[in-house]
Image (cartoon, helix red, strand yellow):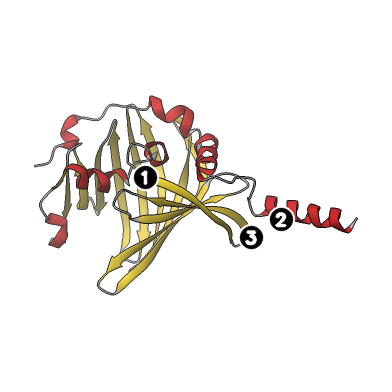
């Protein structure tokens, strides 16, 4: 009887801490299924995501345009003026900033440009094989009362980050990055909340993103999603 109770206890512990999945691919596949990315994203030719963000610096609007197989145009606006932006035309990546400095450096090209741009892909989990990103399942953890799977990702430059997935829902709830800075290594976290559909799509997107930075927390709210509306090629031109 005692052995039976111990066995039950072990099984319940495994379920509680998400050990029913033993491979990272299982966790990622569940996420792609519950968000409907797996079935619906392959039919998307272009998508525009519009956000509003609040931080200590005030309110800003961000528009992200993606054309597939993969081009990106991103603009950050404040008081109607573009203060930051990035364009990846499929071969070159150019950043721009009204603050000058590194934002106006020469374009990156080839694999270096691709590796930087791909991290912005709205459905990155579908692109792991193509982007040479590998995954491994780490021991499960808790975020508050939530049991989460922890998946470590590694790109071909050996840069790593971690994604955390809710055991119950399958949704990605957090990403954790370690960045190099003059002060040494600094961890940056992004929280994903309130998954829901938007007009014109059945895909579930996180409506709220909370990112911790050196300047304080930035809270971004997804306002709209536009799919297959047609994006002009000039939006991806690097001048």
Q: For mark 3, what is the residue?
A: 145
In primary-sequence order, the first of circles 2 and 1 is: 2
SS type, badge 2: helix
SS type, badge 1: loop
> Residue 52 in the image: x percent, y percent?
36, 50
Question: Residue drawn 36% across and 45% down?
Answer: 133
Q: Nearer the viewer, mark 1 or mark 3?
A: 1
Query: Where 38 sits versus 188, above or below?
Result: above
Q: Do the residues labelled 2 and 1 touch (CB within 8 Å)?
A: no
Question: Residue drawn 48% across and 28% down?
Answer: 39
Occupied quadrant, residue 72: top left
Query: How would you rate the neighbour count of disc 2 (Cα within 10 Å): few for under 14, some for 14-19, many for 20 or more?
Result: few
Residue at mark 2 to residue at mark 3: CA–CA distance: 14 Å
Q: For mark 1, what is the residue?
A: 133
Query: How would you rate the neighbour count of disc 1 (Cα within 10 Å): few for under 14, some for 14-19, many for 20 or more?
Result: some
Occupied quadrant, residue 125: top left
SS type, badge 3: loop
In primary-sequence order, the first of circles 2 and 3 is: 2
> Residue 165 in the image: x percent, y percent?
53, 50
Query: How would you rate the neighbour count of disc 3 (Cα within 10 Å): few for under 14, some for 14-19, many for 20 or more?
Result: few
Q: Which of 154 and 141 is in front in this view?
A: 154
> Residue 146 in the image: x percent, y percent?
61, 56
Residue at mark 2 to residue at mark 1: CA–CA distance: 31 Å
In primary-sequence order, the first of circles 1 and 3 is: 1
């Amino acid at each position: 009887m005692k052995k039976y109770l111990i066995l039950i206890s072990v099984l319940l512990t495994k379920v509680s801490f998400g050990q029913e999945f033993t491979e990272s691919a299982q966790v990622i596949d569940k996420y792609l299924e519950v968000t409907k990315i797996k079935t619906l994203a392959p039919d998307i030719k272009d998508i525009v995501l519009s956000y509003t963000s609040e931080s200590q610096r005030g309110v800003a609007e961000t528009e992200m345009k993606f054309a597939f197989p993969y081009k990106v145009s991103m603009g950050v606006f404040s008081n109607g003026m573009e203060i930051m932006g990035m364009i990846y035309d499929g071969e070159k990546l150019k950043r721009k900033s009204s603050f000058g400095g590194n934002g106006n450096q020469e374009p990156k090209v080839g694999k270096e440009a691709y590796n930087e741009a791909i991290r912005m892909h709205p459905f990155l989990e579908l692109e792991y094989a193509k982007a040479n990103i590998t995954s491994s399942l780490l021991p499960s953890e808790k975020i508050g009362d939530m049991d989460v799977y922890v998946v470590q990702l590694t790109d071909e430059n050996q840069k790593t980050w971690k994604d955390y997935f809710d055991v119950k829902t399958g949704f990605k709830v957090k990403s954790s990055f370690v960045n190099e800075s003059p002060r040494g290594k600094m961890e940056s976290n992004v929280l994903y909340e309130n998954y829901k559909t938007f007009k014109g799509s059945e895909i579930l997107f996180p409506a709220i993103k909370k990112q911790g930075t050196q300047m304080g927390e930035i809270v971004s709210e997804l306002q709209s999603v536009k799919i297959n509306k047609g994006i002009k090629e000039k939006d991806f031109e690097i001048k």
